[in-house]
Amino acid sequence: MILGLTMMYLGLVVLLPLSTAILKGATLDGSAFWAAVASPRAIASYKLTFGAAFLAAALNAVMGLLVAWVLVRIPFPGRRLVDALVDLPFALPTAVAGIALAQLYAPDGWIGRFLAPLGIQVAYQPAGVFVALVFIGLPFVVRTLQPVLEELDPALEESAICLGASRGVTFAKVIFPALAPALLTGFAMAFARGLGEYGSVIFIAGNLPMKSEIASLLIVTRLEQYDYAGAAALATVLLSMSFIMLLVINSLQSWSRSRYANR
Amino acid sequence: MPIADTSRLPSIREPRPIRFLLVAGTLLYLGAFIFLPLVQVLVMALSKGWKVYAAAIVEPDALSAIWLTLGVAAVTVPLNTVFGVALAWAIAKNPCRGRRLIATLVDLPFSVSPVIAGLLFVLLFGRQGWFQPWLEQHDIHVIFAFPGLVLATLFVTSPFVARELIPLMESQGHEEEDAARLLGASGWRTFWSVTLPNIKWGLIYGVILCNARAMGEFGAVSVVSGHIRGRTNTLPLHVEALFNEYNFAAANAVASLLACLALVTLVVRAAAEWRVRQQRAAAERNRDEH
């Protein structure tokens, strides 16, 4: 009975609202739907959203591996504090992150003033979207890798080294293959989060149509113009991407589960 | 967090200079991308002195935003806590088919953009929404009012408690509950004196995360709020309004309240995580003994 009640709650709070968006998107006829989701402005926003989310997730995959490695393998003073602070992007409200990043990277900001003489402008540019998504995505990679690194059997590395492998070869042939599923999962999670991120991005992005406008912002713009059908159509596109990513992440997770269970 | 004991195995440790470089690289990256934004907000909040800071927070619109945020959290967090515990209990203690599917459904709100979460409720209850005629007849306002804020927040925060408890309860199994029932305890009694103490820290951890998100949610709430100052602006929306007016000192001051909430969340999280690890280890030891 408790299962039934909780499923009812889940249905009311989550599933019912979700199905309405899909139905609402479906009420548009084909050509109107297509016009809403394939307008040049929408295409530009997809390109920016996907591109920035992909690049940010890629950077986080590399740096997240480094961070996780250091936090698990190398003791240093303050390690527990640093470890706790890695979760900051999870805990800090996105609006707070957004205004902080916008101020940091503004031409007269703490970081921006060093970039400005080099001719690099981040705030109010597409690069700002990337910076915000880097902030948001890091914990996904680190927290997925950490438990796997902790479980990694040192005997494997030792035997590789005893058998004459260099450290580089050991990393490439022993450690990296063991970490790969978790690394890919973390990458996919950071990417998926980046696709839908809104709060931290809009403060720093500048939000110029065709140039620095992300897909979720375009949805909000359509809503503010009372173009509900257009907003729902765009939402259907983003939702289907999210579901594809969810499937990808789930299969990656079961892949890594089977991988780690076999050893 | 336990660390692999590599001290006895010099062969797989990096040489000292390399270790130093790795730590330096990590701290630099985290410093620039993660910690600096937090410091920025706290410093800018106090850049014009305590008086300006205090004035920005006790100003009526800010106070009403604080009350509204607390109100939304006061409704959503308890509801989602009860839901989370019940769901985790139902999945973990009565293994049934399709539990993977249910667990995925529970996580759905995490993979939906917050803006879309807000949009869903506008489509249901907004001007052209399905329930609009009925709501109008009964003079009920959902969108651009408190109920809309609550619904959007409920949607976004629903997974936190459940996803924290499901793995914890699954790892604990149901032997202790079976023993309590066998000894004649009622279902409620078993829950209160066996299940609940076992999941206490995981529960606290889930609730604190749920609360942090409920108070800090921006995208979903921004779509359904209507941005009426002093009426439907929550704290994050108030920060946005101040920032867009170039009132940076006040925006940072209000933001610093949320930043402190995030820090408290991290401290409780670290403490709870440590306890959860201990409990899981104890549960596994128990199971190994049997």
Image (cartoon, coloured by chain):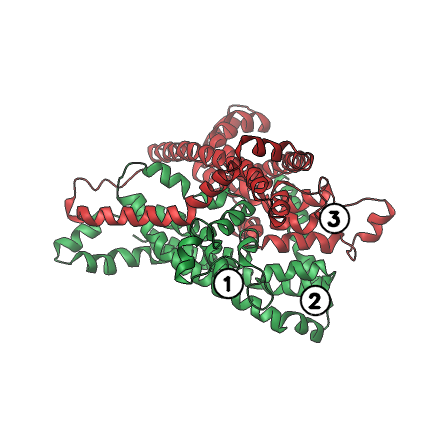
Chain colours: A green, B red
Residue B78 percent across, percent down from the top left:
62, 34
In the drawing, does residue A50 fall left or right of residue A78? right
Asked if marks 2 and 3 fall on the same chain, the answer is no
Q: How far apart are marks 1 and 2 (CA)?
A: 32 Å
Residue type at the position of mark 1: Pro
Q: Is mark 1 on a helix, strand or loop?
A: helix
Residue type at the position of mark 3: Ile
The answer to whether mark 2 and mark 3 are in CB contact below 8 A is no
The answer to whether mark 1 and mark 2 are in CB contact below 8 A is no
Q: Is residue B97 visible from the viewing direction of this image? A: no
Tell me which chain the residue with mark 1 is part of: A
Residue B242 percent across, percent down from the top left:
62, 45
What residue sits right under mark 2 in the picture? A26
Foreground tag (3 vs 1): 1
Q: Residue at x 32, y 55 (%)?
A: A179
Q: Which residue is drawn at 72% across and 56% down?
A: B123
What residue sits right under mark 3 in the picture? B143
Foreground tag (1 vs 2): 1
Give me the disc on residue A126: 1
